[in-house]
């Protein structure tokens, strides 16, 4: 019997960029994110003689799955089997899986589509295992999610979550956990997307290049020494001023690492920089609690308090050539009875 799950993207406040082990997606440093409440991804998984992946775009059109896409799911399934063997559940997973994906997220534009997809896949696989009497913990589901997309481990949890990089090369040495639930500090994320054009370099490729940057080593040290904990402290104290300082510092630093890698990666566009400049002026003029942060794409995430939401929405919708997503702090991945999309 098939199993179904639903999940959403997250927006990283301390960014995951670069691995100590690319094959197992073991991150070089810790990270923190806020799980969003929309847009959704739904995944169905079922037993199959051969691996199949059917994917549908946010507007309902079937998406062509390239050999590269299929290979990623095949690699993930192999790693899942390796992990289940590691935790004594070697008989839990079937020979192969048929995946059906419905996504409300435009792909590859910096909206963490792979994080939503693989957290959803992990949750659905957990449902399939449950049918055979194998119950996974939330931490174990986060490990399975990480094996497909590192940041997916954080979308397993609602509210704010942290991924612990851990040490060594054990397959489960990196995992995520919740910091606080969604209702602890409701914040809004107004996402402004200058372009829906698919980015040239995916995040997986970028992670592999991160260590070529002369700035990468210092970035890892700063995160592990103080930046990760500063971000967690800001969340637990609901200290927006500190959160703004730490999150913007980390986002800028990550993009400097990207630009100084070999080859250089430029995910931000001229429109991205214009939005940043404008929002810095706008928040000073209006005294608004809003911060900006960018993942591996041109989208600008404007995270703000309830009090600042109306003003930020007004600004976002004034950008006529941009696509705007309105989101807020939400719940993580969870199992569902049947697809709703």
Image (cartoon, helix red, strand yellow):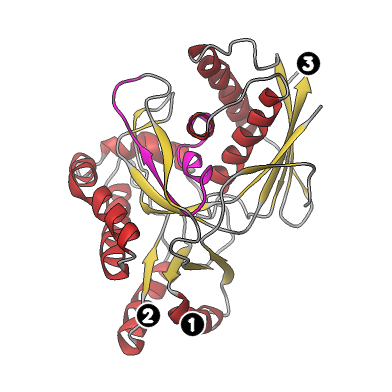
Tell me the CA gap for discs 1 and 3. 52 Å
185 left or right of 82 in image: left
Name the foreground residue: 218 vs 130: 130
Disc 1, SS = helix
Discs 2/3, front:
3
Q: Position of residue 124 (x, y in %)?
A: 67, 34
Point out the stretch of residues depicted in magenta: 143-169
Whether the magenta-drawn stretch holds residue 151 is answered as yes
Q: Earlier in the sequence, mark 1 or mark 2?
A: 2
* Foreground pick, 3 / 100: 3
**Residue denoted by label 3:** 49
Q: Nearer the viewer, mark 1 or mark 2?
A: 1
Of the image marks 1 and 3, the number of the one nearer the N terminus: 3
Give the Cα distance between marks 1 and 2.
9 Å
Q: Which residue is mark 1?
A: 315
Whole-percent x and y of residue 242?
26, 65
Tell me the CA gap for discs 2 and 3.
54 Å
- Is residue 296 visible in this depiction of the protein? no
Q: Which residue is rendered at x = 38% and y = 30% of the image?
A: 174
Eyeballing the image, is 196 above or below 204?
Answer: below
């Amino acid at each position: 019997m098939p199993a179904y799950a639903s999940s959403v993207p997250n927006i990283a406040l301390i960014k995951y960029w670069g691995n100590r082990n690319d094959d197992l997606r073991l991150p070089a440093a810790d990270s923190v994110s806020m799980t969003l409440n929309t847009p959704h991804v739904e995944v169905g998984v079922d037993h199959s003689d051969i691996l199949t992946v059917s994917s549908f775009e946010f507007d309902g059109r079937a998406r062509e799955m390239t050999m590269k896409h299929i290979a990623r799911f095949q690699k993930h399934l192999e790693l899942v089997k390796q992990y289940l063997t590691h935790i004594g559940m070697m008989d839990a997973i079937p020979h192969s899986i048929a995946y059906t994906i419905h996504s409300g997220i435009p792909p590859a534009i910096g909206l963490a589509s792979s994080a939503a997809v693989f957290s959803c896949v992990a949750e659905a696989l957990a449902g399939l295992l449950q049918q055979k009497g194998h119950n996974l913990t939330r931490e174990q589901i986060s490990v399975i999610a990480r094996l497909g997309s590192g940041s997916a481990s954080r979308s397993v949890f609602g509210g704010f979550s942290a991924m612990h990089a851990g040490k060594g090369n054990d397959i489960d040495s990196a995992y995520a956990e919740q910091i606080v639930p969604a209702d602890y500090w409701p914040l809004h994320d107004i996402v402004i997307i200058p372009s829906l054009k698919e980015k040239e370099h995916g995040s997986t490729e970028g992670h592999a290049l991160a260590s070529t940057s002369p700035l990468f080593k210092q970035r890892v040290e700063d995160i592990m020494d103080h930046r990760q904990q500063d971000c967690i402290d800001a969340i637990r104290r609901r200290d927006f001023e500190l959160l703004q300082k730490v999150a913007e510092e980390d986002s800028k630093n990550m993009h400097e690492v990207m630009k100084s890698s070999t080859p250089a990666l430029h995910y931000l566009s001229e429109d991205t920089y214009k939005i940043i400049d404008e929002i810095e002026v706008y928040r000073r003029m209006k005294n608004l609690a809003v911060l900006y942060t960018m993942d591996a794409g041109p989208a600008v995430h404007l995270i703000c308090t309830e009090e600042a939401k109306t003003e930020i929405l007004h600004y976002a919708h004034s950008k006529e050539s941009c696509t705007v997503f309105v989101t807020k702090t939400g719940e993580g991945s969870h199992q569902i009875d049947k697809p709703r999309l």
